[in-house]
Image (spheres, grey):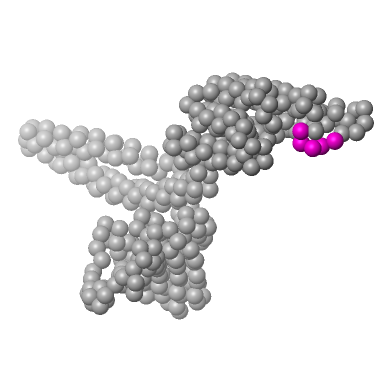
Amino acid sequence: MLLWIQRNVLKSSAYISLAAFFGFGGLDLAINGPASLIPAAILAAGLFAARLRDWAAVIAIVLAAAGNLFLGVKPGFAGGITLCVIAMVAAFGSRLWSLITLGVAVVAGIALVSKLVFVSGLGVFEVQTYGPNAALNVALFGFGLVIATSFAAFLIGRLTITRARHVGTSTDQVVAFRERARLNLQIAEQDARFEIAKDISELVIQRLTAAVSLADGATFALRGESELAERTLSQVSQSARQAHIELRRLYDMLNKLDKVNAAPPGIADLDPLIPLYRELGYNINLNHLGKKLPLEEGLELAIYRIVFDALENIQVHVPHGADVSIDFIWSEAGLQVLVKDNGVEVANRKAGLIGGGFEVADDQRALVETITGAGITAMRERAGLYGGAIEANRVPGVGFTVSAIFPELSR
């Protein structure tokens, strides 16, 4: 909501000011009569202009207070619009003008309370006071109420914008967590690439070492035969030595790199994703059926990535409000992972389609259709590394299902 207000300045200001005018101004109209709409309209205009010009809020508060003081309009619910103005300027205005707006609002409120108690008298509201200090006590109570509510509105505005900028909304936190999960995957895969690079560089070093040795031996063997052969072999030896030095530097660098302090994500790391996708608007559940089997780290990473990519695809293509299930079905030696959604059913329901919005031809097409795409191909490659397979298919009128099958985990 706050993000929408920040991005749509004019539209959000118009909606908020109209809501405040019709809400608070309507109450004043019903209780105090048509004249009370004058200060309400002025304050609503100031609320609308506050996002564009900070000083407009101060002018609106002064004019509204003057209307109450000199036009004989009884103070009413329009004070609620004043609190909205204070909160708006505190949230989106400069620090200087937010403090000026707060101060002007407090002074205007105290002036209205003073006029009401000491000049007009509470009789205008059919309230009687008794005792020599009754009016003073009522005035002090009114002053305290004005100051307390004004400061409360100011603090609400400041806390709201501070939370949005430095803490973030629940949606911001969901996005941050998903980004962190994606980075963890990249880090884990990068670690694997470093391991492969170290193995390859070590092999190349061994082969170059042998080449250097052979070249040195040939140089000594041919020293008496031909100066040209000697010169050529010396160049080969020198080039090989230079390559050997460079590869040794690469190997040492890769071996001296500290491992990134982040364990590759596994199946257990899917649990925190569940409440986050619920926050995004999906009815998601994670279930384990059967006895869990111990898995090697690389296989857990592959399964995590398959489920993560399936959820990413759901967020792109499936409407909010859909049911999503992640089922781990464990057998004695294997595992099947099912990621299912009913996005088509939800979309058809929202579109008002009768009968599920599918026909017999959809059933026939689903039986023979082969799902392709970069994401599905990557899933199949990851599963294939561990003797697994990926099946992806549409369920007509319901949604989409991704099945990862690992029949022999013990191999």
Name the residue nearer the viewer: 136 or 304: 136
**Main SS, magenta residues:** loop
Against 378, residue 15 (above or below) is above
Q: Is residue 111 above or below residue 273?
A: above
Q: Is residue 127 magenta?
A: yes
Q: Position of residue 167 (x, y in %)?
A: 56, 40
Q: Percent x, y for residue 64?
A: 61, 26
Residue 184 showing in the rendered view: no
Q: Nearest the camera: 294 or 168?
A: 168
Report the residue at 44% width, 34% height from top.
Answer: 10
Span highlighted in magenta in the image: 124-128
Q: Is residue 196 magenta?
A: no
Along the horizontal axis of the image, is 150 left or right of 345?
right
Relative placement, left or right, of 347 versus 328 is: left
Q: Which residue is at a point 34% across and 42% down the rendered structure image?
A: 251
Residue 178 seen in this snapshot: yes
Residue at x 21%, y 38% (from the top left corner): 240
Image spot of residue 303 (x, y percent) = 40, 63
Residue visible at 44% across and 37% down in the picture: 11
- In terms of depth relative to the viewer, which is nearer, 324 or 54? 54
Q: 85 or 33: nearer the eye?
A: 33
Q: Which residue extends farthest front?
A: 34
Q: Is residue 298 above or below residue 37?
A: below
Image location (x, y in percent) of residue 169: 53, 44
Lateral position of residue 360 relative to residue 257, left or right: left
